[in-house]
Image: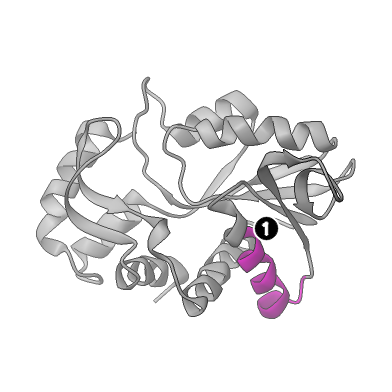
Amino acid sequence: MDYKKEFIRFMCESGVLTFGEFTLKSGRKAPYFVNTGNYRTGKQIAKLGEFYAACMEQHGLQPQVLFGPAYKGIPLCIAAASALATEYGRDVEYCFNRKEAKDHGEGGVLVGHKLVDGDRVVITEDVITSGAAVRETMPIIQAAAHVELLGMVISVDRMERGKGELSAVQEVDRDFGLKVYPIVTIQDIIECLRNGEVPGGEYLDKMIQYRKEYGV
């Protein structure tokens, strides 16, 4: 099983990817839901970091720094940095932001590596729903230094239209020139259901229909 199929199974076993009927913030009725808040053990976060590292390796991303937007991106950048070191022998820096600037001690909004001009940076996030988190993150990074943004790695690309005809991932590329690399896409999940590689095959038809209705 390649790492994409393994990741889908991992999400199911961790209770992160579930099937049923879910009302999304957009009001759409979806037959699946991704809740990365259900990762809760050391073993899970270590494994999750390995998948993020594998995605970077697959796409030839060679960052000097991993940036994790608060809050969910914080454990992701740390876990991925650890996995890059242990699995691939690449020791990279990491940093993340605070929601509020600290006015004592070292101060500022960034924790960890202090970004400097020319740093090659990859952002780690869970999913992109509306792109709001990216719009909050970009000014923070740009205010810190003139870095080279290699891309953003996320868990799942829903491949779903936002308010317009583009998906949230496509909007991020259009608005910021930021390439997004998902570990898996919703189409990968559909294929796993079709092949019986993960539980939830009874929702295959609904998944396909939902994709036809809202997908890009």
Type of amino acid under label 1 = Gly
In magenta, the rendered stretch is 77-90
The quadrant where residue 11 appears:
bottom left
Residue shown at the point (40%, 72%) measured from the top left: 6
* Extreme residue in the top direction: 164
Look at mark 1 in the image and give the residue it sits on.
60
Above-or-below relation of 101 to 135? below
Residue shown at the point (67%, 33%) measured from the top left: 138
Above-or-below relation of 163 to 100? above
Work out whether residue 171 or residue 131 is closer to the camera in this orientation and state it.
131
Residue shown at the point (25%, 72%) measured from the top left: 197
- In the rendered image, residue 90, in percent from the top left (x then y), is placed at 77, 71
Does the image show residue 204? yes
Is 92 situated left or right of 175 in this image? Answer: right
- In the rendered image, residue 204, in percent from the top left (x then y), is placed at 15, 55
* Mark 1: few/some/many CA within 10 Å (<14, 14-19, 20+): few
